[in-house]
Image (spheres, rainbow, N blue to C red):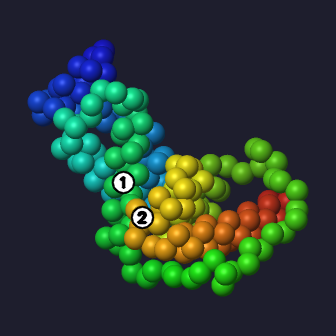
Amino acid sequence: MMSEQHIIDGCIRHNRKAQEMLWKQHSGYLLGVCMRYATDRPEAEDMLQEAFMRIFFNLGEYSGTGSFRGWLRRVTVNTAITWYHKNLRHKHHAGIDDYVSAETGTAGFEEDFYTAEDLYRVLAELSPGYRMVFNLYTIEGYKHQEIAEMLGIDVNTSKSQYSRARAILRKKLEELAHMKGKYT
């Protein structure tokens, strides 16, 4: 078994075995990252391919400080953002004042009620703009100002899209819970 540093060094030298090792060790995790940004699994797989091309091409830029897995994740998220910009057909621009969040007031859902597939499917049903902002804010931990700069949108648009995404997700999860309640 090669150490992480040996794999990195091998990949920098374009060693196919090292590239294969890197793929085997990290592709599953990074596919999960891509799934949160893609509309379906084939799109996530395409996004993952592009992310690995960037990883292999830019691996010499990894400084060795910080988590290597974190660096891989950052490259993958940046690839998802680029993918979003390349495939953007419609931008949703609305000010935060144009939207009032639809809070349901219902109690939280049981922790194990939804499968990972349920959650991926519901996320994939969001429009690309909503999905991107929701993932960047909720999962990646960026602030709305940072998201606005990354996506080239207004801060209020980021906030609005996040609020709308939450409302849509809440509604879809409630519908799913209702359906599961009927059939379980």
Q: Earlier in the sequence, mark 2 or mark 1?
A: 1
Rendering coords of residue 160 (x, y %)? 61, 73
In the picture shown, does residue 10 fall above or below 89?
above
For the C terminus, the quadrant is bottom right
In the picture shown, does residue 68 fall above or below 163?
above
Please tell me in which quadrant of the rendered image residue 72 appears: top left
In the picture shown, does residue 31 fall above or below 127?
above
Circle number at residue 78: 1
**Residue at the image point whose x is 51% and y is 82% from the top:** 93
Label 1: which secondary element: helix
Q: Which residue is disc 2 drawn over?
A: 149
The amino acid sitting under disc 1 is Asn
Rendering coords of residue 121 (x, y %)? 59, 61
In the picture shown, does residue 35 fall above or below 28?
below
CA neighbours of label 2 inside 10 A, class few (<14), some (14 to 19), many (20+): few
Query: Could you tell me how far apart the alpha carbons at marks 2 and 1 are, in whole angstroms?
Result: 13 Å
For the N terminus, the quadrant is top left
**Residue at the image point whose x is 19% and y is 25% from the top:** 9
The amino acid sitting under disc 2 is Glu
In the displayed structure image, the side of residue 20 where residue 93 appears, left or right = right
